[in-house]
Amino acid sequence: MDTFTCTTRPEQATVPLARPEPPRGRPRAHLALALAALAVLAAALPADGLHWRGAVVLAVFTGAVGAWVFTKVDDTWVALVAVSLLAASGAVEADEVFATLGADLVWLLIAAFVLAAGLTRSGLVERFTAALLNRARTPRQLAHLTTLALVGSSLAVPSTSGRAALALPVFTSLAKAVDPRLAKALSLLFPTVVLLSAVSTLIGAGAHLIADQLLADATGSGIGFLHWLLLGLPLAVLSCHLAAELTLLLFTRRRDRKTRLSLDLPTPPKAWTAPEKQAAATTAAVLALWCTEPLHGAPPALVGLLGALVITVPPHGEHRVSPGAALKTVPWSLLLFTAATAALGDALVTTGAAQWLADHALAPLEHASPEHFLIAVVLVGTAAHLAVQSRSARSSVLVPVVIPLALAAGVNPALAVFASTAAAGFCHTLTSSAKPVALFADVEGVPTYSARDLLRLSAALAPLHVAVVSAFALLVWPATGLPTSL
């Protein structure tokens, strides 16, 4: 029987993100984007109730979205150019742009990545992975236990790219030990669950922090870590296990699913090591403090920072991560992108551009019933990945428009924002739709999926995703503290 060892190191916990590059798109595409932005500016300037600052923000926003959709220019570069133009034009104050770099959401992400690095280096990830997957006796059990492990990882490891990189060695070892058909199904299952499980927690994706920040800026209060967990975790568990079952049905045969498995993953010694105990205690304490913020009042970013300091305390060694090594796992390009898109989204709200766009471009939705409005939001959020590939960019595009529309339609903006953000977690149609999908598309030495396989899964999973998120938005979340109406 084949055996394998699952090993990960902090340096593998995130997918290296490319350094922002200058534009590489065609000049005609750039000219078209510039003309489109100028056209929006010309149309918006004479508009009643829209200040010139709002018109400039709207024009820059149009250009940024066009660059994200139609060119291959680096997303971070586009976002930084957009906020630089806003500051240079005077549409927003330069201090407001730079302030986002020191915002709580940026520090929270940094702390979460450092915590994840310490957790990984301690060996605790390998211990739980082996203990869980060794229980699998059939392909169906393997798929659902893998799903359970990946959903659990979303509670401690920020960013979908980080979880995908962390799971890649596990998938590679499993794929070499099972039938090629099951290996292909697992190659689809891993990124699918990584993406769908992100909704379980506020730190599951940078897009969540952006959405929560924009909601707080517009309405005075965000959703918060504990409430997000209560709303998102049940959705993540249900949607991920449904996706696991769907993947098995589409890509394996009945006799494949009845095959007996005997995985023999080497397990660590029964006695926990000191680094494992420290990592487990620190992570548990941080999660508990995040969930009880209303009781003690400590901001999540401060709690995360204290946890990061504890998990990197000397002495350092093979199973203890140093501060320098932990900080190397932080995707700084992602943080810059998150800060820039948050500033862009905030500018849309504060200058009135988002309200103007909602009033003029999407006015018919204002007269829809709350139920129809929420379903429309879910549909748009699910389809948005076909136009805007970055999850954070989708939030910065959708959330500023969803909030005023929800207020006009009499829908709770927090519910609309959460539904939109949850729906936008679907990004499985193309290899380029998300970094985890691209990461698992080409793994050396093991069978993975083709573009046709991805389309086949997406065609079946997208309607299921819309139905599940809509059901939660209409039935479940209103019953768990997020009412449909204000």
Image (cartoon, rainbow, N blue to C red):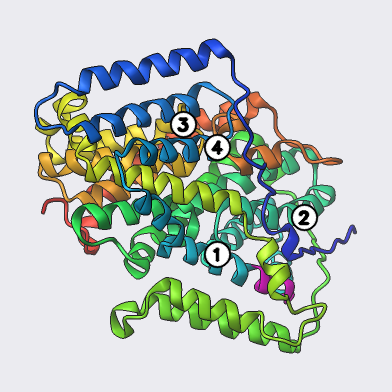
Return the residue at label 4.
Answer: 77
Of mark 4 and mark 1, the one earlier in the sequence is 4
User: What is the spatial separation of the Cα atoms under label 4 and label 3, in whole angstroms?
Assistant: 15 Å
The three-letter code of the residue at mark 1 reads Ile
User: What is the spatial separation of the Cα atoms under label 3 and label 1, in whole angstroms?
Assistant: 25 Å
Q: Position of residue 157 (x, y in %)?
A: 58, 63
Q: What are the residue bounds of the magenta stretch? A: 117-123
Please name the residue shown 43% across and 54% down the image: 199
The three-letter code of the residue at mark 2 reads Pro
The three-letter code of the residue at mark 4 reads Trp
User: What is the spatial separation of the Cα atoms under label 1 and label 2, in whole angstroms?
Assistant: 24 Å
Of mark 2 and mark 4, the one earlier in the sequence is 4
Above or below: residue 156 compared with residue 411: below
Q: Position of residue 414 (x, y in %)?
A: 24, 53
User: What is the spatial separation of the Cα atoms under label 2 and label 3, in whole angstroms?
Assistant: 29 Å
What secondary structure do most residues of the magenta stretch adopt?
helix
- Is residue 122 a member of the stretch shown in magenta? yes
Q: Which of the labelled discs sits on residue 110, or is there none?
A: 1
Look at discs 4 and 1 and give the one toward the viewer. Answer: 4
Look at discs 4 and 3 and give the one toward the viewer. Answer: 4
Q: Position of residue 19 (x, y in %)?
A: 66, 42
Quadrant containing the C terminus in the rendered view:
bottom left
In this rendered view, identify the residue nearer to me: 485 or 128.
485
Please name the residue shown 86% across and 41% down the image: 445
User: In the drawing, does residue 301 fall left or right of residue 438?
Assistant: left
Return the residue at label 3.
Answer: 388
